Amino acid sequence: GPTLGHRANVSRELLANAVRNGGLGIRNPIDTAERQHATSVSVTLTLVDSIVRGEKLDMLAHERQMKETRKCEREVRAMDEESFIFQLGQRKPSLKNRLARASNSGTWLSAIPNHLCDNILSAVEFRDNIRLRYGLVPLNLESICDGCGKRADVEHYLSCPVGGLRTIRHDQLGRTFATHAHCSDHSDQAARMGLQLEDASKQAGGALTVLEA
């Protein structure tokens, strides 16, 4: 797809895996059609039987049937994905460690983006992280480091002591601290204003008490 690039040699079956199994959780409807149909038939078995027989639906039995079917489907799918990952690692030993890392570092794909946690990625950041997840070079990565002028790859950009992404990360961290400090200052101002209003209210209340006396 456009995220990985047209030349990316990434298995479609791998992308269909759950995030915890090295994939992206993007199911292939063609591959899962028969299984999904069988699951649907099993889930509605009690309901259909009650309709055909013209009998009252046993809700407890219906809920139990749905729960057991879904649990079985999840277990079978997880086993299939784990088996695929194992076989892929056996065929391509170089992928084994990468797939293990991908399986253990996919929290950012399943977390809900929000400003509080500062985990909202731009389109470019998302594409770059997806490509790095599967051992691909980010698109439009400069071949010469902007900090030291040497030939650079991903590892160089992440560790260059002169510039590159290291400087960008430091600058971003500084901006983050500045943003939090700015928000903190506003919070302190609001708190002080609230205390001042509370004191003024108490003083006004005391004055009214004196007048009434």
Image (cartoon, helix red, strand yellow):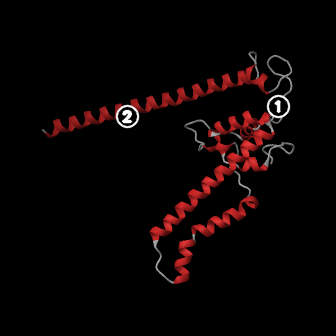
The front one of 121 and 213 is: 121
Can you give x and y, in whole percent of width and height, for residue 144 in the image?
86, 23
The residue where tag 2 is placed is 194
Label 1 to label 2: alpha-carbon separation:
51 Å
Numbered tag placed on residue 75 in the rendering: none
Secondary structure of residue under mark 1: loop
**Which amino acid is tagged 1?**
Leu
Residue at coordinates 32% horizontally, 34% vertically from top-left? 198
Measured from the top left, where is residue 168 in percent x and y? 71, 25
Residue 207 lies in quadrant: top left
Q: Is residue 143 above or below residue 204?
A: above
The front one of 83 and 26 is 83
Q: Quadrant of residue 176?
A: top right
Residue occupied by mark 1: 141
State the image coordinates of residue 203 (x, y, percent, origin top left). 26, 33
Of the image marks 1 and 2, the number of the one nearer the N terminus:
1
Find out whether the residues at labels 1 and 2 contact each other: C-beta distance under 8 Å: no
Is 99 rendered above or below residue 37? above
Residue visible at 60% across and 53% down?
A: 75
Residue at the spot x=76%, y=61% of the render?
30
